[in-house]
Image (cartoon, grey):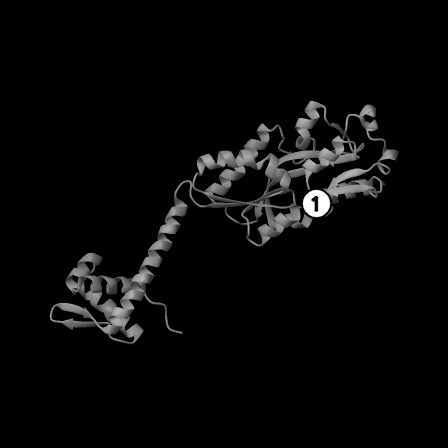
Amino acid sequence: MKPTLDSRQLHAFAALARRGSFTLAAKDLFLTQSAVSHAIKALEDDVGCRLLDRVGRKVLLTQAGEQFLRHTEKILREMETARSGLDTLTKWGHGRLRVGASTTACQHILPTVLREFRQSYPKCVIRIEPGDHGHQLELLRGGHIDLAVVLEPPGQALAEYTFVPLFQDELKFVVSPLHPWAALGRAPREAIEAETLVLYNKTSHTFRLVNEYFREEKVALSNFIELGSMEAIKELVKIGIGAGVLAPWIARQELESGALVALPLGSRKLKRRWGVAHLKGRRLALAEETFVGLCVSVTELMGLSVPSVAA
């Protein structure tokens, strides 16, 4: 395979074709005439044909030289475009940000974070990939997104990622204020199996956490409705179709207005850790570090606590 063309030789050829003189081309390139002459000879040896005719003090292109000049100019333009593109990425506010997040995070966390982010990076191209926990980890692993606002990856999977904790929440029952559990202020253990539970997507990490929790509590999950939206869960619960399971911060407005009532799942709490994940060993760009910092700040302003190691 023939070696790649030398860009310095191409620059010398283009300058010589433009100026028609070794003296002027050397002056434009801040080189000696000898250096330009050697570059052209090496280029002609490389391409295997004569590109220039020397007529007195003038330099004229051969037919091959005319054809090669068109390619040379195109190559040099592409090289300049590539350099300009990289220069743009280093400028403040440029670049791209590819973020994955669950529907819940997209609705409750990202709008404020991205509003603040846009003020610092007005020309940054932002792409959001919605999806559940497992899907986000796959996108990270495949290099399709840079960051993901997700629940902490379990056990062995965590070894692949750097996880920056944002906050810890607790899953609880939410019921209509007219539900019998609301008057009791708790969910009787013996009544849970008979109640219709309204749960988040069966394929989600949250469902697996809930299912595992009740299995350990020796409570069978046999009567449940699964939905792909926390908003839909809240609406069904409001009209009395069972008891939902979600984190109170997702239903803060409804809980404060009295439209819903939150109750513990049982004597043992079911907690989750939220954070921003990225592939381990990957160095974050400044825009990505800014995004992570804004996620921390925004969740703190929302009253969500950063978990301690012992939490």
Residue extending farthest to the front is 239
Residue 62 in the image, given as x and y percentages of width and height: 22, 73
Residue extending farthest to the bottom is 48
Which residue is rendered at x = 55% and y = 35% of the image?
A: 111
Residue 231 in the image, given as x and y percentages of width and height: 68, 36
Residue 168 in the image, given as x and y percentages of width and height: 66, 34
User: Position of 283 compared to 181: left or right?
Assistant: left
User: Position of 215 compared to 153: left or right?
Assistant: right
Sort mark 1 into few (<14), some (14-19) or many (20+) by Cα contacts within 10 Å: some
Residue extending farthest to the left is 56
Q: Of residues 235 and 83, which is closer to you in this image?
A: 235
Which residue is rendered at x = 74% and y = 43% of the image?
A: 207
Q: Which residue is mark 1?
A: 205
Depicted 296 relative to depicted 259: above or below: below
Quarter that holds the C terminus: top right
Query: The residue tagged with tag 1: helix, strand or loop?
Result: helix
Q: How many marks?
A: 1
On the question of residue 63 being in view, the answer is yes
On the question of residue 171 being in view, the answer is no
Q: Of residues 282 and 274, which is closer to you in this image?
A: 274
Tell me the quarter of the picture where residue 276 sits. top right
Quarter that holds the N terminus: bottom left
Which residue is rendered at x = 54% and y = 47% of the image?
A: 146
User: Position of 95 compared to 273: left or right?
Assistant: left
Depicted 267 relative to depicted 80: above or below: above
Which residue is rendered at x = 45% and y = 43% of the image?
A: 124
Tell me the quarter of the picture where residue 274 sits. top right
Residue 50 in the image, given as x and y percentages of width and height: 24, 75
Tell me the quarter of the picture where residue 152 sits. top right
Amino acid bearing label 1 = His
